[in-house]
Image (spheres, helix red, strand yellow):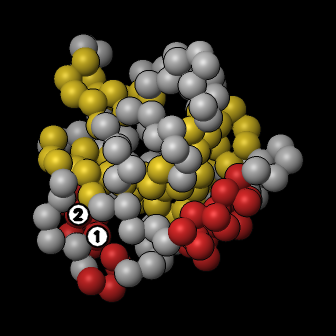
Amino acid sequence: MSGLQFFDPYYRQIPNRLSEKTKKELLKLAYEKDAFVNTGYNISFFKYPSKLQKFAPYGVGQMLKVIEKDSKIHKDNGRTNEYDGTYMPRNIVINYPLTDNSSNTNWYDDEKNLVTTTEYDKHAAILNTGGCYHNVEYKEGDDERIVFQLCFEESLEEVWDLWNTQKYRCF
């Protein structure tokens, strides 16, 4: 199986294989009152990732929402959710846009110079969020951006190999 676009070590674009039914179920959870909390990067995490694990055939499920401009340039770190205790590895994530505004992800070198941009165009992507600096493009007036993520400790190559197994791609 091949990806749609590669820009190693930053990301690999892949087909978005979430079913419409799964997407609707995830968005229903996302639109619950007070479902998200801002983490300080102008990116909000879903408060109760334990509710998302039934949608995660591998890795740890999480949703992110962006409704504020100027997300900070950062590398992700694994973290324990303070609301339900779920540990979320953040080395590599598979990012599935749920809303029409999938907003681009910008990638930077170690000096924080822009190197490339992931343009989703309704596709998904395997992102090296723990190994590379990045932020989310979002301008005032943009529609909210909500994504479902499968989070992993493994390397980009290991997650790529996992995604390429037939069993994994069918969910």
Residue at far right of view: 33
Classify residue 26 as left or right of residue 137: right
The residue indicated by pointer 2 is: 160
Relative to residue 134, is residue 111 depicted above or below? above
Element marked by disc 2: helix
Residue 105 % position (x, y): 37, 33
Residue at 45% of width from left, 34% of height from top? 103
Spatial CA distance of label 1 from label 2 is 5 Å
Which corner quadrant holds the N terminus?
bottom left
Farthest residue toward the bottom? Answer: 167
Place residue 145 in its image quadrant: top right
Rendered location of residue 128, percent (x, y)? 30, 44
Q: Which mark is residue 163?
A: 1
Q: Residue at x 37, y 61 (%)?
A: 16
CB under 8 Å between discs 1 and 2 = yes
The residue at 34%/44% (across/down) is 121
| Residue 51, placed above or below residue 130 | below
Residues 102 and 113: in front is 102
Of the residues shown, which amino acid type is indicated by label 1? Trp
Give the quadrant of the C terminus.
bottom left
Q: Secondary structure beneath disc 1? A: helix
Q: Residues within 10 Å of mark 2 (few under 14, many from 20)?
A: some
Residue 53 position, x and y percent, is 60, 71
Amino acid type of the residue tagged 2 in the rendering: Trp
Residue 105 in sight in this render: yes
Q: Is residue 75 left or right of 52 when viewed as pictured?
A: left
| Residue 74 visible from this viewpoint | no
